[in-house]
Image (cartoon, rainbow, N blue to C red):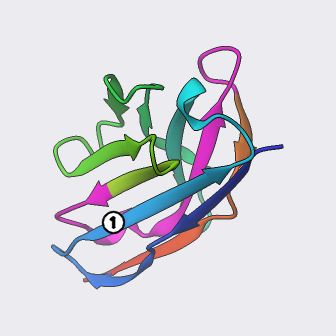
């Protein structure tokens, strides 16, 4: 059983920054890739960024490329999402998820953390 817990969300003005964290437990952290997703009110959940087991490979949605940075610290069993130059359209609940067995298959999810960007 894997447990993922997000933190770091909050209210920030447009142009500001936040850093989200995703703390994992229950499995060997360095053996799986992870990703961030988000869901805005009335919209479907969308992919934000992903990172490989070692952290050597990352991938971003076009909407956040150049503004967000995903990283992980395998010694701390924690993944991060540094969000800079935030825009009102970044407002959403942000979730972390574990990718398992094959690319695009996410089997464990956190409970989410709210990010609100005011204009």
Report whether residue 97 is seen: yes
Residue 37: horizontal and vertical position, in percent? Answer: 53, 48
Mark 1 crowd level (few <14, some 14–19, many ≥20, 10 Å Cα): some
**Residue at numbered disc 1:** 19
Residue 86: horizontal and vertical position, in percent? Answer: 24, 67
State which quarter of the image contains the C terminus. Answer: bottom left
Q: Which residue occupies 31% across, 23% down?
A: 56
Q: Magenta stretch: residue 95 in it?
A: yes
Q: Is residue 37 above or below residue 33?
A: below
Instruction: Farthest residue to the top: give it.
Output: 102
Residue 50: horizontal and vertical position, in percent? Answer: 44, 34
Q: Is residue 21 left or right of residue 88?
A: right
Q: Is residue 22 above or below residue 19?
A: above
Quarter of the rendering containing residue 84: bottom left
Nearer to us in this view, 94 or 54: 54
Q: Is residue 67 left or right of residue 88?
A: left
What range of the chain is rendered magenta?
A: 82-105
Instruction: Farthest residue to the front: give it.
Output: 75
């Amino acid at each position: 059983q894997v447990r993922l817990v997000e933190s770091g969300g909050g209210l920030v003005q447009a142009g500001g920054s936040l850093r989200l964290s995703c703390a994992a437990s229950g499995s060997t952290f360095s053996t799986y890739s992870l990703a961030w997703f988000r869901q805005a009110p009335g919209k479907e959940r969308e992919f934000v960024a992903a990172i490989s087991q070692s952290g050597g490979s990352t991938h971003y949605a076009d909407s956040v490329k150049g503004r967000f940075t995903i990283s992980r610290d395998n010694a701390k069993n924690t993944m991060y999402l540094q969000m800079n130059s935030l825009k009102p359209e970044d407002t959403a609940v942000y979730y972390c998820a574990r990718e398992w067995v094959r690319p695009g298959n996410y089997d464990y999810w956190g409970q989410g953390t709210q990010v609100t960007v005011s204009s």
